[in-house]
Image: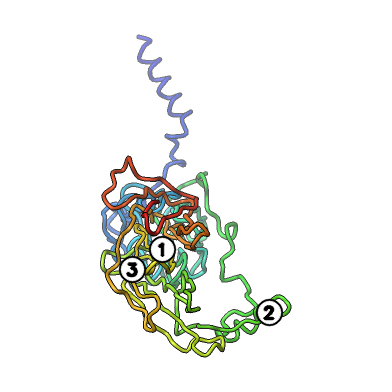
Amino acid sequence: MKFPRIAAALLLLSVVCSPAFAADARPIKPLGKDGKPLNFDFETGTLKDWVATGDAFQGQPIRGDAVSARRGDMHSNHQGEYWIGGFEVHGDDGTGTLTSVPFKAAHRWASFLMNGGTWAETRVELLTADDKKVFFKISGAESEELRPVVVDLEKQLGKEIVIRLVDERKGGWGHINFDDFEFYDERPELKNELKPGTELLALTNDVYKYAGVTPEKAAEVMTRPEGFKAHLVAGEPDIVQPIAFTLDARGRVWVVEGMTYPQRAPEGKGQDRILVFEDEKGEGHFTKRTVFTEGLNLVSGIEVGFGGVWVGAAPNLLFIPADLNADEPKPSGPPQILLDGFGYNDTHETLNTFCWGPDGWLYGCHGVFTQSNVGKPGTPSGQRVHINAGIFRYHPTRHVF
């Protein structure tokens, strides 16, 4: 007769002592007007219960850890299967908003996962539904990894509120990541919490003395050693997004416009090109501009010599044959893939900074976070050369890496 009492006592002790079962420690899903949980964790695989404007959130939500698939130093840290990954579809070029349906602030505390750009233009806002006033906002910490944010809703209890994701910025870290809005009865203690005003200062707060000056003025106000002068050879709009350059034997400047970065485009959709600038009069400014080739993909390195142009465009090292002595430089044949296997999961760590060494080899640099396994096309994986955070060289006639 004693066993049921002992079991009941043990069960009661377990319930009282285990914080995992305490009502105030569990997340609570926000409910819609129909009494059903709202799609604030995106596990429907759709944007149900949300309204998108612009193109920043087209193609969302994202399924799985797309972050680690393209870069080796971060994970998405999302909840469940789906999440909002602002970079994963349109990169940093998309702008727009993603706004939830109104819902009642039924509990004092809320949390959600977010990250992305530190910019004021990339943020998560909470608004009161009746007057559309923002009562909470936060930007990211310049990371793709989602981190928890906790919000005190004491002043909004019982009122209808709205969640709004805002992306008003193009360019570096011009995106926002988001997932899993939930309520709590008591303030949750969450690891790696992201708090407004405690992370990286937004770059918009930086002050640049000569921000926005013309290219000509930029050369004029440069700080130079005594006895040195600076001349503008070329500037916008004659050249945009320069990512790499080199000089040929005639003193011409070969420049890569890196328009494809930060994501490698689908095959045949690259937007990078190589321009050649020449100062025919020797006056310090170009008088001749030639488009050598275009349609390249994720170019990050260039050098000329040995009968052509050497181009780093992960995953490939390319050689474009050309008559380098011609007055109108142009390819004399299609690009040749000499090596492949260069990684681009972190696209600002790819092969770069090409130069000829005194030994006649082509030298280049390789960033730290991208992992590469390099070899001639078709080389088995076991015979390839692994490299990251290093310097490599390639022989232009013996074709040895």
| Mark 1 and mark 2: Cα distance apart in space | 56 Å
Given contact means CB atoms under 8 Å apart, are the residues at marks 1 and 3 in contact? no
Q: Which residue is mark 2?
A: 228
Instruction: State which quadrant residue 333 falls in.
Output: bottom left
Q: Which residue is mark 1?
A: 163
| Mark 1 and mark 3: Cα distance apart in space | 52 Å
Q: Residue at x 60, y 82 (%)?
A: 219
Q: Is residue 94 above or below residue 220?
A: above
Instruction: Say which of 295 and 324 sits in front.
Output: 324
Q: Helix, strand, or loop for circle 2?
A: loop
Instruction: State which quadrant residue 129 falls in.
Output: bottom left
Q: Position of residue 2 (x, y in %)?
A: 38, 10
Q: Residue at x 63, y 84 (%)?
A: 220
Q: Earlier in the sequence, mark 1 or mark 3?
A: 1
Question: Could you tell whether 284 is left or right of 97 in the image?
Answer: right
Q: Is residue 335 above or below residue 26?
A: below
Q: Helix, strand, or loop for circle 1?
A: strand
What amino acid is at disc 3?
Ile
